[in-house]
Image (cartoon, rainbow, N blue to C red):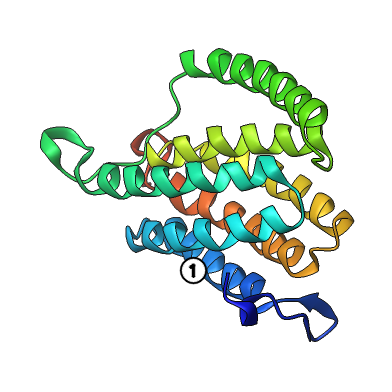
Amino acid sequence: MVEWLNQSLRLAQFATTPLEILGFLTGVLCVYLNTRQNVWGWFFGIINAVLYGAVFWQVKLYADMGLQGYYFFTSIYGWWMWLYGGKNGRELAVSRTPTALYGLFALIFGLSTLLWGYLLSRYTDASLSYADSALTVASLIGQWMMARKYLENWLVWIVADLCYVGMYLYKDLQLTALLYAVFLVLAAMGYFRWKRDVPALRPKPF
């Protein structure tokens, strides 16, 4: 890693590094563009995944570090899906999450959190193994739902982002905690923006 990216500095009251600042900016751009269903959000998601992979490796949040690899590949997948994943290879439209998926999501969340948390606590020096794992698995699910343009992905992100703010404050990643507070607001905005594009949920004209 280029040394200047890891130089300690203060931004207002936040202790941070240029690497974390770049992660902050690309993260905000990514999520903001996603709320507007702009495919360029996935481009900034790819860059953000690389930057935050390095940030989380340095503070031993290994589950979050691994999550960035998943973000990298699902950003490519999401970019393609949004452009060509709809009917007849057209742009993908916003839809409700199929009810049958919720049970599968719950099973994946519970089992993966327990297994990943155990492995991290048993075989690594990871910090907050189970909390980090739970939020990582929730993010895996939320990211896949976003790539499929399921409306409820934003509800998953609202809960996850709220918990992430607390975890990053605890780990003294103050700027990243602020980033996830911004993500929390953007997730709420995204939910209401996308909700307008679900045909069954559009307000009926008088």
Residue at x 34%, y 60% (from the top left corner): 38
Residue at x 66%, y 70% (from the top left corner): 20
Give the SS element for disc 1.
Answer: helix
| Count of numbered labels shown in the rendering | 1
User: Is 127 or 164 nearer to us in this picture?
Assistant: 127
- Image quarter in which the N terminus is found: bottom right
Residue on which the image places disc 1 = 29
Q: Is residue 39 left or right of residue 9?
A: left
Q: Position of residue 134 (x, y in %)?
A: 72, 32
User: Is 198 or 31 nearer to us in this picture?
Assistant: 31
Q: Is residue 82 left or right of residue 106?
A: left
Residue at x 33%, y 42% (from the top left corner): 77
Q: Is residue 139 depicted above or below 168 in this figure?
A: above
As drawn, the residue found furthest toward the left would be 88
Q: Position of residue 133 (x, y in %)?
A: 71, 33
Q: Is residue 159 left or right of residue 36?
A: right
Q: Residues within 10 Å of mark 1 (few under 14, many from 20)?
A: some
Q: Is residue 47 left or right of residue 54?
A: left
Q: Position of residue 48 (x, y in %)?
A: 51, 61
Q: Is residue 83 depicted above or below 41 in this figure?
A: above
Q: Is residue 78 depicted above or below 37 in this figure?
A: above
Query: Which amino acid, mark 1?
Result: Leu
User: Is 187 or 8 nearer to us in this picture?
Assistant: 8
Residue at x 15%, y 43% (from the top left corner): 90
User: Is 28 or 122 nearer to us in this picture?
Assistant: 122
As drawn, the residue found furthest toward the right would be 170
Q: Position of residue 147 (x, y in %)?
A: 39, 41
Asked which quadrant contains residue 155, the reply is top right
